[in-house]
């Protein structure tokens, strides 16, 4: 496949690019729109942009998806700086409250183990050749819910985002939950925000929350999930 990676932080992505090239994909890297002003020549792309997107890049990514592209946004791709990118947030169907909001404020928890919990065990992306590290007891944040045992990938010494607000109703497929231990209270935080996919126009946006630490991209299970995002037939 002909792939692109667009990012403003490259150290964590070295392992991802090497993995994709090992699989035989052609990978081009950008920090802005490519010289030909469009991503349409690519079969799929990865987005890892921490800062606010400039208006041209925001429109380029949104148009790529609507025109039939498959875009995988990783970690920072839906962090708090994107509140200044309304078209991007509308594409994702996401809202972020300020850090000082009274109800469900945006929060970043660093230096913790992130358990990426498979909430959609019948889906190709979450299951095809993915070897999970363990089973965890998880309660869905889609309340009311009862706890159950689910397979999970264990990603140590990384970063977790808490309180990403979904908008748009049931216009996405939730693939993964995120679970981590709150370093302040010791309580386990469980939210159905580890990964999802959302059709838009003729294409699809896939978001996966891991990716803060280079070690996330050294985890064989997570790399297989990323590969599955590319080979998924769009049906199941």
Image (spheres, helix red, strand yellow):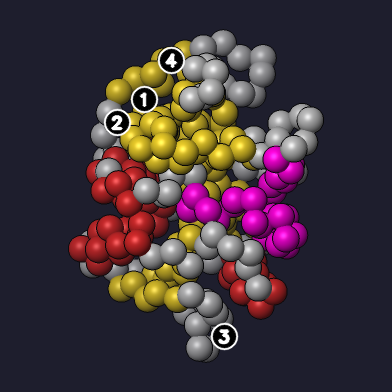
Q: What element carries label 1?
A: strand
Task: Give the camera-side residue of 31 and 27.
Answer: 31
Q: Do the residues labelled 1 and 2 touch (CB within 8 Å)?
A: yes
Q: Which mark is residue 183?
A: none
Residue bearing mark 1 = 151
Q: Which comes sooner in the sequence, label 3 or label 4?
A: 3
Residue bearing mark 4 = 137
Task: Give the camera-side residue of 38 and 154.
Answer: 154
Q: Distance between the residues labelled 3 and 4?
A: 47 Å
Q: Distance between the residues labelled 2 and 4?
A: 14 Å
Residue bearing mark 3 = 37
Q: Which comes sooner in the sequence, label 4 or label 1?
A: 4
Q: How far apart are marks 1 and 2 (CA)?
A: 6 Å
Instruction: Provide the residue span drawn in magenta.
Output: 74-99
Where does residue 145 sit, x and y in percent of width and height? 61, 14
- Residue 153 visible in rendering: no
- Residue 85 visible in rendering: yes
Q: Which residue lies furthest to the top in this view?
A: 146
Residue name at image x 29 percent, y 68 percent? 25
Residue bearing mark 2 = 132
Q: Are marks 2 and 4 in contact (CB under 8 Å)?
A: no
193 in relation to 214, above or below:
above
Q: Residues within 10 Å of mark 1 (few under 14, many from 20)?
A: many
Instruction: Give the number of marks.
Output: 4
Q: Are marks 4 and 1 in contact (CB under 8 Å)?
A: no
Q: Which residue lies furthest to the front in this view?
A: 184
Does 75 appear in magenta? yes
Where does residue 108 sit, x and y in percent of width and height? 56, 40
Q: Residues within 10 Å of mark 2 (few under 14, many from 20)?
A: some
């Amino acid at each position: 496949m002909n792939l692109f990676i667009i990012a403003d932080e490259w150290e964590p992505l070295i392992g991802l690019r090497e993995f994709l090239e090992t699989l035989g994909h052609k990978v081009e890297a950008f920090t802005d729109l490519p010289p030909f002003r469009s991503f349409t020549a690519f079969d799929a792309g990865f987005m890892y942009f921490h800062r606010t997107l400039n208006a041209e890049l925001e429109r380029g990514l949104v148009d790529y998806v609507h025109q039939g592209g498959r875009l995988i946004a990783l970690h920072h791709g839906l962090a708090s700086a994107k509140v200044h990118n309304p078209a991007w947030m509308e594409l994702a169907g996401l809202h972020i409250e300020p850090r000082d909001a009274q109800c469900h404020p945006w929060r970043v928890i660093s230096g913790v183990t992130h358990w990426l919990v498979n909430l959609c065990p019948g889906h190709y992306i979450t299951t095809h050749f993915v070897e999970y590290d363990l089973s965890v007891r998880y309660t869905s944040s889609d309340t009311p819910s009862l706890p159950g045992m689910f397979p999970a990938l264990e990603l140590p010494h990384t970063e977790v985002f808490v309180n990403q607000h979904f908008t748009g109703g049931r216009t996405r497929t939730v693939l993964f939950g995120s679970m981590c231990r709150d370093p302040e209270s010791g309580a386990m935080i469980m939210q159905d925000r580890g990964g999802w996919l959302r059709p838009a126009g003729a294409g699809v946006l896939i978001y996966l929350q891991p990716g803060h630490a280079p070690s996330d991209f050294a985890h064989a299970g997570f790399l297989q999930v990323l590969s599955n995002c590319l080979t998924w037939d769009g049906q199941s």
